[in-house]
Amino acid sequence: MSKVRIKQEESLSIKFLHQMEAGDNRRLDLYFFLPKEMGINPQSLNEEEYYHSSITGRRSYYSSGLHLPLVQSRFASQKKRTVEEFRLYLNLFAYQFAVAIETDCKELGQVEDFEQFYSLLDELSEQVVHLLKRFRRNEPSDEKWKSYFENADNYLSWFCEQRLLKLLAHAPRTSDFNEINDRVLNLCRAEAQYRKERNYNSSQTIKDPNRIANKMLLLRRLIQQGVVLKEDLKTLGVGLKKMTTGIATGMVMLVVSALIIKAQGFFSGLTIALVLTLAVIYGFREIFKDDIRNALWRIIQKGRPRWSRALSDTTSKNIIARQLVWLEFMRKKELPKTVAEILTKRHSQNKVDAEILHYGIHTRVSQKDFLSGYSTIQEQVNFSFVPFARNLERGKDKIYKEHDGKISNESVERRYQVNLVLVLKEGKQAQQYARYKITMNRSAIIEITESDLPSGVENMEEAPFKDELTDNLKDKREDRVKDKPKDLLQDKSSLAD
């Protein structure tokens, strides 16, 4: 399993995913090299606004081998665990199951080849059937525990149905795969009938899309309890920013006061010329006051973390990890030496001027206070490229071709290449590096490819395989067996009856 994975999330977003164990001290830096022709710079993109609107994260407990005996009926009969512990482990299973299905469906939605799409859709539907059967086979008999199981079962059934229907709604239209299409539809109908027979939802709720959607949102939140870590985000440097504002105002007023005194000495008495001069002085004060404050604040803030985040267990309230977050534009001369060296390896045609956006996150994980039986948390951070795409040009050019005397033309899209250098530092170990090329246009990310590093630069251990960076889901199945709960469930050895 790779330490850090860079993958495409949706049409205009990417994500990085990694796991951290108890006691880890990890610093992760991402350097985005945005070509200047994209029009992204400190004047057009506010770092704080981008952070709050376009960077989203999810941190939760993680287990590569789910504690499924805690969900099995034999666990209930042994009564070695409390109801609360059963609920927490059940929630962890349901949450990882939902996330795995969600991820697979998003990736499958990006497949354009008809045959590949329906083949993978058929495989996914079989996995859903297999997993739901195994999950339901371990339904507890104790009424105290049954309500928790029913909530998870209700949500997983509805969620899988919705994801499969969404895939079919946007599937390529062809009659060659009607058999697969019908099988998936029958699965969705069977799940709807299953929920109806179990009386999971009232008829009024089923008929009203708003009610059923809000109920499932509530069930999702119930499943996340004890699994998804609570985040307490604080903006750093608030007091320092106020002090900077005061200093900037004082500097401006010092200059203004000196000019006023000089003007009064130049003009004798209160004249129209003096009044006009004072008006001009105060006008310039208003013009330059904010610019001076912002420039001074950027100098003081340079290299400092912008936010701090505390991750706590929602059940025990214990703090599991603390994080510091950086987000800033950088100059080329401020880049670490090795990162600059990696960029020099680019082909000459790709060496264009670029704005550098740096995102850094430093995490210190607690040695203790984890949920009993777990020692790993998983973090996923998504970066939306929508704010970048707004400034991009549409393709206006055309390519002309001649065939048998006939001339045809095709419109071409304008593509941009964003270079991404990832730097990982684990405790006192040496830094490790990886570089990716993100090709995008105004409407979508075309591809993400990993690039070679210069000799002498330490590559990231177990870096993601290249086929993990594409939309070829079929090639990624074997790797997913290692870290996806839905695939782990297929291993009969982990489900002793």
Image (cartoon, rainbow, N blue to C red):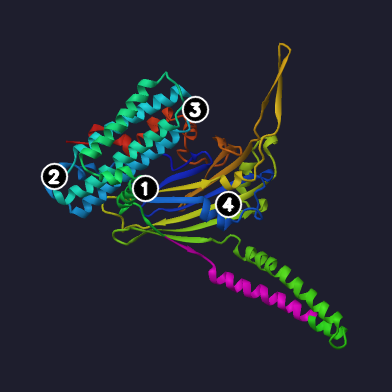
Badge nearest the viewer, 1 or 4: 1
Are there few (<14), some (14-19), or many (20+) residues within 10 Å of tag 1? few
Secondary structure of residue under mark 3: loop
Residue 47, relative to residue 285: is it above or below? above
Q: Is residue 236 magenta?
A: yes
Looking at marks 1 and 2 on the same chain, the residue that comes earlier in the sequence is marked by 2
At 67% from the left and 47% from the top, the residue drawn is 39
Rendering coords of residue 149 (x, y %): 22, 46
Looking at marks 1 and 4 on the same chain, the residue that comes earlier in the sequence is marked by 1
Looking at marks 3 and 4 on the same chain, the residue that comes earlier in the sequence is marked by 3
Residue 358, relative to residue 173: is it above or below? below
At 38% from the left and 21% from the top, the residue drawn is 178
Mark 3 vs mark 2, CA separation in Å: 45 Å
Left or right of 129: which side holds 436? right
Which of the labelled discs sits on residue 358, or is there none?
Answer: 4
Q: Are marks 1 and 2 in contact (CB under 8 Å)?
A: no
Rendering coords of residue 356 (x, y %): 63, 49
Camera-side residue of 480 and 273: 273
Extreme residue toward the top, this view:
404
Are there few (<14), some (14-19), or many (20+) residues within 10 Å of tag 4? some
Q: Amino acid at mark 1?
A: Asn
Looking at marks 4 and 2 on the same chain, the residue that comes earlier in the sequence is marked by 2
Which of the labelled discs sits on residue 141, or is there none?
Answer: 2
Camera-side residue of 22 and 301: 301
Q: Amino acid at mark 4?
A: His
The region drawn magenta spans 232-259
Magenta span main SS = helix
- Residue underneath mark 1: 210
Q: Is residue 61 magenta?
A: no
From where the camera sits, is residue 294 visible? yes
- Residue underneath mark 3: 112
